[in-house]
Each structure stands twice: as C-alpha cells, then as structure tokens.
Image: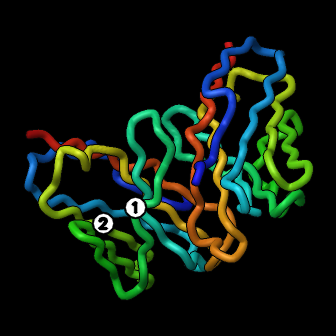
C-alpha cells in the first residue's frame, strides 16, 4: 500500500472557482504534513504545512484529520497562476527525516 | 540567498555508462536529501545526509548507486553502471538542523538512460 494516496485529477476549473484536493496517508505514526506545489518541469516548493487544528494562508486552507488519516487543501477564488501540480507530503518525524510524496493532483485554471 | 543548485540539468547516457550528479545545498544547511521521480510515479526518497554522515540510506535502490558528501558541503550521486530503469528526475533538497521542518528543493537533474 502506498504511503500517500492522492486523486491525480486532472482538475480543470474556471477562474474564481473553489477547488478541493484530498489525500490519505497509511502510516498512523506520521507527524508532519505538507502541501507542496510543483510547476511543470520545476522543483517542488512548499505551499504550506498542515496543522491539526487546520490552517489558512490567504486563499488556501489546509485541514488534517488524524483519526481518518486524511489531509485536504481548499483553494478559493482560483487564479490562473494556481495552475500546477499539488503534492500531498507526509513525514514520520516531527522535525527531520525523509518525506513521503503522493503522486500529485494536477490543477488547470482556465480564464 | 542562493537556493539549492544541481548539475547537470540534463544528462543523456547509454546503458552501462557512469553518470555523476552534483548537488550544492543552501549555505549552512546540514541536512541534504536525494529524491528521485521515475516517470508516472511519485517522488521517492533515496538518502539523507546530516553533514557528511549518511543518516538514512534506506531508499537507495541497489549498489549501483553511490552517494558522497565529503566535507559536509556539496554531495554527489554516482550511478555505475546505469540501467534503463534509472531514468528519471533526481532532486536534491536541503534544510537546516535547527529548522528541519522545511526542505528546499533544487531544480533537479533529468537523467535519460538509452
């Protein structure tokens, strides 16, 4: 079973739409959770960490459900520049160690 | 502040040849990671250095892969001899020991083995 499972999409939405991505992780001992963004043929870049209480950064909201081992990312008021692949990432350690990646969910925002 | 750099950006080699990839982490970052993305699959961990020591090399696929980080600065990943299934994008990432939360990734080396 994969460590992190994501719906690969693609998601195609118009500008201004709200879109949600989900992922699940298999190891209940995981302690750190992230969403990374990867533009075409570029490196992954940290979008936001995900905390147990949920957290928001502008138009982006991340949620974590430890009981269900489920992580979500909500993007409100989508912009053309949000088009990218969104990677759900998990780490077993709280501060250090290898990252486990999902395959990524592809988002295209059209005008 | 300069980011993580990797060299070369692309490499095309024939099966059986040797290739060496280089990663220069962000200055002051003691943690250095190697990851690989094979086409159609997720990014997977290869190994983790803390300074010059291998902290975790459980992701290395086989003994054709050799990673070094002499002096605790830049790192090299050598594949010898290369096989077709080694094709993919090799990413390097670094982070600070006292701020291990965020790993910063380099642009990757695209390796194609023919």
Q: Residues within 10 Å of mark 2 (few under 14, many from 20)?
A: many
**Callout 2: helix, strand or loop?**
strand
> Mark 1 highlights which residue?
A47
- Give the side of residue B29 with respect to residue A39, left or right: right
Residue A50 x %, y %: 42, 75
Q: Give me the chain letter of mark 1.
A: A
* Residue B34: image tag: none
Residue A32 x %, y %: 54, 75
- Does A61 appear above or below B5? below
**Quarter of the figure with residue A1:** bottom right
Q: Residues within 10 Å of mark 1 (few under 14, many from 20)?
A: some
Residue A110 x %, y %: 13, 40
Compare residues A98 and A22 and report the one nearer the observer.
Answer: A98
**Quarter of the figure with residue B106:** top right
Tell me the residue at 39%/55% (across/down): A6
Q: Give me the chain letter of mark 2.
A: A
> Mark 2 highlights which residue?
A73
Let me know if residue A1 appears in the view.
Answer: no
Quarter of the image for the N terminus of chain B: give it.
bottom right
**Quarter of the figure with residue B22:** top right
- Give the side of residue A104 with respect to residue B70, left or right: left
**Callout 1: helix, strand or loop?**
strand
Quarter of the image for the C terminus of chain B: give it.
top right
- Give the side of residue A9 with respect to residue A66, left or right: left
Q: Are marks 2 and 1 on the same chain?
A: yes
């Amino acid at each position: 079973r994969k460590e992190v499972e994501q719906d690969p999409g693609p998601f195609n939405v118009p500008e201004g739409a709200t879109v949600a991505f989900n992922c699940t992780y298999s190891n209940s001992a995981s302690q750190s959770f992230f969403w990374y963004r990867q533009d075409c043929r570029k490196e992954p870049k940290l979008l936001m960490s995900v905390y147990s209480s949920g957290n928001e950064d502008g138009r982006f909201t991340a949620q974590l459900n430890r009981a269900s081992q489920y992580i979500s990312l909500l993007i409100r008021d989508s912009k053309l520049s949000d088009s990218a692949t969104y990677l759900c990432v998990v780490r077993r350690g709280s501060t250090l160690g290898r990252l486990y990646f999902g395959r990524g969910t592809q988002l295209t925002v059209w005008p | 502040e300069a980011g993580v750099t990797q060299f070369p950006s692309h490499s095309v080699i024939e099966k059986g040849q040797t290739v060496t990839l280089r990663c220069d982490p962000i200055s002051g970052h003691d943690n250095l990671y190697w990851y690989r993305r094979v086409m159609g699959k997720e990014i997977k961990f290869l190994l983790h250095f803390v300074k010059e020591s291998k902290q975790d090399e459980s992701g290395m696929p086989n003994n054709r892969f050799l990673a070094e980080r002499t002096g605790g600065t830049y790192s090299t990943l050598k594949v010898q001899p290369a096989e077709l299934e080694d094709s993919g994008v090799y990413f390097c990432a670094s982070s600070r020991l006292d701020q291990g939360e965020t790993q910063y990734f380099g642009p990757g080396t695209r390796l194609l083995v023919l």
